[in-house]
Image (cartoon, rainbow, N blue to C red):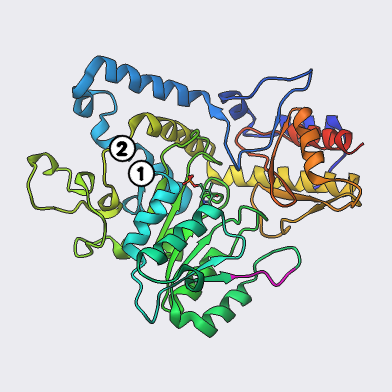
């Protein structure tokens, strides 16, 4: 597309945007000092869908009106409330409905899934993560290694970047697996790397891991609702995600998990169990013997926090309505426009860390001019009511979310970036 560097052009793209009506379904933070909000932080905390408030209030009303009968007799009985997330999760991750479950939060799910899938032996006990892994994932992996009686220092293998921009190359992963794959029990890797915004070749990672005899787990925190996923096909052993980033379900909202169908059989009882993993037909007979639920529900342990699940259900409805292919198409246009504007206006000052051909909605910006301090620039943007986020040591992450951001937001961001640079 031939882009133009002016406000009118951005407005024209907005008028042609088939998803433009979704913007009105979200609450934006207020204007400050005459500056409208430029919110490009959907990769960290998505904006609030108006429907989320309705769904939370519905459940508060159901609790007030039905009390304990809400489990079975309200409009959306709590006993199976989590199932309202199934279709949305399956659709966004390319999974079968029986492979996904809304439960817990992300790091908690990584631990529960590692309880099932990280079964180290003396010969094969290491966990491979990427060099700049999100700290929570690293801590989770280290502690799992320690809990199994191994040394976390020695037990973590890092997939390092051999490239100055910090991108991860599949050939480097293949080399590690070739060299020491026999000692690696688990690959725990992201779909989209949070710092660089690089989309990893998940299908290939799964294949390489499988060929080396390793279990593969994917952290989809930055991938779900952002890029195309085909989990059933790619066949990682498990995956987990949060729902407050691109999925807009609010702070600490209930996350999700995927367990490949090959592991979902009643013969596989390697999970930590609770009553919500019990077959629901006989759950309330309160028997001392455990009858496993079918599919990913077997990994569910407790009855879920309905109030933290309600916004997830609301948000997934919006995703189903908008459709992931349309969102991704718009996302590409938004980031192409952003990239074009940045390269055109600030070729000397601002670099883009995120690979052009392997990215979702996020661009990771770095200041290239030694006379400008990145953190100071970020603080100036904040004053101008621009919300992105700062990641140590030197990255400003911005992510136009196709569900509610506009081409005018992108244009306005670049205008304010120019102001902040002056
Ligand atoms: C956002 C994010 C988390 C957050 O973990 P919680 O358990 O939801 O607090 C973990 N890992 C990655 C890679 C993330 O991007």
The mark found on residue 379 in the picture is none
Would you say the magenta stretch is mainly helix, strand or loop?
A: loop
What residue is drawn where x is 30% and y is 64%? 263
Of residues 149 and 89, the one nearer the viewer is 149
Estimate the x, y position of residue 335 in percent, counting from the top left. 72, 46
What residue is drawn where x is 40% and y is 24%? 56
Secondary structure beneath disc 2? loop
Secondary structure beneath disc 1? loop
Estimate the x, y position of residue 14 in percent, counting from the top left. 72, 32
Mark 2 is surrounded, within 10 Å at the Cα level, by few (under 14), some (14 to 19) or many (20 or more) other residues, namely some
Quadrant occupied by the C terminus: top right
Tag 2 residue: 304
Identity of the residue furthest to the bottom in this view: 179
Indicate left or right for 124 with 264 as reference: right
Of residues 48 and 391, the one nearer the viewer is 391
Give the extent of the magenta segment: 159-163
């Amino acid at each position: 597309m031939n882009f133009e560097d002016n406000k009118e052009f951005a407005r024209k793209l907005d008028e042609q945007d088939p998803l433009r009506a979704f913007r009105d379904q979200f609450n934006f933070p207020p204007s400050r000092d005459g500056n409208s909000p430029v919110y490009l932080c959907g990769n960290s905390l998505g904006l609030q869908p108006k429907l989320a408030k309705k769904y939370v209030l519905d459940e508060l009303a159901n609790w007030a009106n039905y009390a304990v009968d809400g489990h079975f007799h309200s409009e959306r009985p709590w006993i199976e409330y989590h199932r309202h997330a199934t279709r949305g999760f399956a659709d966004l991750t390319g999974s079968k409905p029986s492979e996904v479950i809304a439960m817990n939060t992300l790091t908690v799910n990584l631990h529960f899934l590692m309880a099932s899938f990280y079964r180290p032996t003396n010969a094969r006990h290491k966990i491979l993560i990427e060099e700049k892994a999100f700290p929570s994932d690293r801590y989770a992996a280290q502690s799992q290694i320690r809990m199994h009686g191994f040394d976390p220092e020695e037990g973590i293998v890092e997939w390092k970047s051999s490239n100055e921009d910090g991108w991860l190359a599949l050939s480097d992963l293949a080399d590690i697996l070739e060299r020491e794959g026999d000692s690696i029990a688990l690959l725990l890797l992201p779909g989209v790397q949070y710092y660089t915004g690089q989309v990893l070749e998940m299908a290939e990672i799964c294949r390489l891991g499988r060929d080396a005899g390793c279990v593969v787990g994917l952290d989809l925190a930055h991938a779900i609702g952002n890029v195309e996923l085909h989990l059933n096909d790619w066949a990682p052993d498990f995956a987990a995600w949060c729902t407050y980033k691109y999925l807009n379900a609010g702070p600490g909202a209930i996350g999700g998990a995927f367990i490949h169908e090959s592991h979902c059989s009643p013969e596989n009882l390697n999970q930590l169990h609770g009553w919500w993993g019990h077959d629901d037909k006989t759950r309330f007979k309160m028997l001392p013997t455990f009858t496993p639920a079918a599919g990913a529900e077997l990994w569910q342990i407790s009855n879920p926090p309905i109030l933290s699940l309600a916004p997830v259900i609301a948000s997934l409805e919006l995703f189903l309505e908008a459709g992931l292919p349309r969102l991704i198409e718009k996302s590409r246009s938004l980031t192409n426009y952003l990239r074009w504007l940045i390269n055109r206006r600030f070729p000397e000052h601002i670099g883009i860390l995120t690979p052009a051909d392997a990215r979702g909605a996020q661009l990771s910006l770095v200041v290239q001019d030694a006379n400008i301090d990145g953190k100071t620039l970020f603080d100036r943007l904040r004053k101008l009511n621009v919300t992105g986020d700062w990641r140590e040591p030197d990255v400003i992450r911005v992510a136009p979310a196709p569900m509610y951001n506009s081409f005018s937001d992108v244009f306005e961001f670049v205008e304010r970036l120019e102001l902040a640079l002056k």
